Image (cartoon, rainbow, N blue to C red):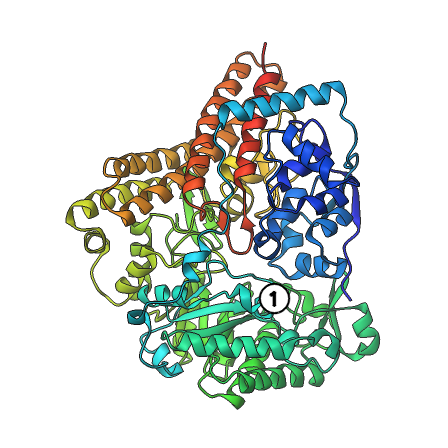
Amino acid sequence: MQTLPQTSERPALVYEHFPSVWQGIIWRNWGLVPAERLARALATDEASVRAAAAELGLDPEREADPTWMTRGYLSIIRHNWHLCSFEQILTMLEISAKELAFILKEDDFMWHKMGYLKPTVCDNLYRALTPAERARTREIAAQLAQELPERPDENAFAFIAPFMQPTAECDRPAAAAEPAEIAAGGLRTVYSYFALYGDPLMNPELDPFPERLLAEYTRCGVKGVWLQGLLYQLTEFSFDPSLSAGYKQRQQALRELTERAARYGIGVYLYLNEPRAMNESFFARYPELRGTREGDFWAMCTSQPETKRYLEEAMRSLCAAVPKLAGFFTISMSENLTNCYSRPGDGRLCPHCAARPPEEVVAEVNNLLARGAHAANPNVRAIAWNWAWGETWAAKIPALLSEGQIVQCTSENRLRTEIAGVVGEVHDYSLSQIGPGPVARELWQAAHKAGHETCAKVQFNNTWELSAIPWLPVFEQVARHVANLRELGVQHLQLSWTLGGYPSPVLRMANQLMAGEGDVHSFMRAWLGDDLGEVADHAQAAISAGWREFPFNIGVVYTAPMNYGPQAPFFMQPTGWRATMIGFPYDDLDTWRAIYPREVFAAQLEKVVDGWRTGVNLLKTRLGENPEFDDLATLAEAGLCHLASTWHQIRWVMARDRWLAGEEGARSELRGIIAEERTVVQRIITLRVQDARIGYEASNHYYYTQQDLAEKLVNLAWCDAKLQP
């Protein structure tokens, strides 16, 4: 049974722009969490909560949108991490401790994103305000009335409704495609733009792939969609059937999805990361299966015959139950503790695996899963992703794969970079630096030699460099990458991880270029017409040129504020908190910048911003003539806002540190940055009202709400007041 992690003794961060902690809770959750639940969490009554909301300038009659409980719960957890206790979060979400523990463990590394630490909160229950707090509350309400006189209702998730509409008759294929037909010409797989990551098959009403979305994917050349699967949830787990509760319901939902997708020429693929680690109570019953340990979990050792039988039989059973399942891809290292070598070098800690080379163990896991699948359906495509395989032995694996697997590699892995004189390399998630890198080249060569087809994992819509808009207008970058892959004979593409699944013109272009049809310039003209296409082409070229200046490093990508952008608050004093992976940037500039000196990091972001601004200004000259052109302009400007805000954040921390050290002139510099950031925040608020996609990503839900952006204006005013001479 999963339990919540222990709360740390470290006190929570204080957001000083709020008069009191409990008012911050109301502010951040207003319209997301029902007022009655907020009242219970704050140990008061609903009338008091609504009155307090009114005092802050919020609409006291506003009711919560229930969609947040099903599609936005990660945002709520993140919003309240430093404001609420676990018990309060459970009350607001109205879930059990077991359910929250599952979310933190399985919902795309949520515990990691939270920094592996739940801080202690205090003074977070409703109480009477002091005179000073009440005066500050009036200031906030007055500021909002002045800066945001018209505050439209939150439009979160509005982009989903159009995809839920029935497809037009002309969009419906005459007959379902067979798996062999779907795979012809190369796989092109994506993750749903709005799928739930944790357990999507248990909630059919939250369909991750409605028919209109499938139809749009077909127009983009997408031939496969993927979602996460846990074998113990998709089949009966013989070691502990209680973990498999609902598996038949999941199988039924998966069957229906595969049949529906096939009608659009799309196959359904599972992401498998198996066998999942188990806790102490499991191994008290099965001590012989205990493998490598990590924290409170141990691997189910895959050198043991019982584990091998389980993997093979589970896949056979699943593919028999879901006969139209097109395939699966595996990650056999790094993402979670699975086999005893799933953490580099850890296999030696297992007495059963210590004598076996890691390539043998990893290849065996892939073979067992594929063999079980093929026993039920020989047409299932098995894809072995080399994610985190050891460089000294990765190229040995293709020769050990015995089940006709496709060998996949992240295209840009270990690509050398030299940006502003700083030498580094790409691990993954790069649109600014163009692959493939040496690891992919070597692995694909070994795969071709062993008779395997090859697949490139890419991010052509967006990356963690900037995932808060659905696709980045850097067509030139994608075109260059496609040309490199074609030259190496790569046939298949996994187009996205959990980010990057929007049916976009970028994906349409990539599919055409992979087929050898045209170039980026001809695509832009065919898409938007000769005249507007010419303008858009010049704009994307400027944006792409600016994007190539991005100071890439995986540490930058994971921790710097690009994804939160205008939402991330300014801090007057160093917080002392370390930035977390796509979680909390805090003010941790020295983690954000990774390998780059502070001044170089700031200068490179300025170059990126300059390139994007040039492109956006070009696009603004022709607004109102074509809705798809206008969409391009909106997303380009939203991206510019995020990047400009990141540049402001970097400059803020540098100037703040000089101000705290007593440097003359730093105060006026800080106030100038506040003025620049206020303009960006006001603009992103306008764009966000127009387009609910802005600020959203499937595995993180919303990075911010309209209310969060309003909070940033409050934060800026508070900082400016503190800087008054």
Residue 309 percent coordinates (x, y): 66, 86
Tell me which residue sits at (54%, 22%) in the image.
655
Q: Quadrant of residue 656?
A: top right
Q: Compared to 11, does 279 lie above or below?
A: below
Q: Residue 363's image quarter? A: bottom right
**Residue with the most extreme right position:** 284
In the rendered structure, the answer to whether residue 375 lies left or right of residue 629 reads right
Q: Quadrant for residue 575, please give it.
A: top right
**SS type, badge 1:** loop
Q: Kindly identify the amino acid type of the residue bearing the numbered disc 1.
A: Asp
The residue depicted at 54 percent of the width and 16 percent of the height is 666
Give residue 235's position: percent from left, percent from top.
Answer: 63, 80
Is the N terminus in the top left, top right, bottom left or bottom right quadrant?
A: bottom right
Q: Position of residue 677 (x, y in %)?
A: 48, 28
Return the residue found at the far bottom.
Answer: 375
Q: Quadrant of the C terminus?
A: top right
On screen, residue 437 above or below 228: above
Q: Measured from the top left, where is residue 330 in percent x and y?
A: 54, 71
User: Does residue 219 appear to the left or right of 501 in the view shown?
Assistant: left
* Residue toward you, 447 or 15: 15
Would residue 501 be seen by someone viewing this image from the given angle? Answer: yes
- The crowd level at tag 1 (other Cα within 10 Å; few <14, some 14-19, many 20+) is some
45 on left or right of 609: right
Res. 602 visible in picture: no
Count of numbered marks = 1
Judge whether 298 appears above or below 613 on screen.
below
Tag 1 residue:
199
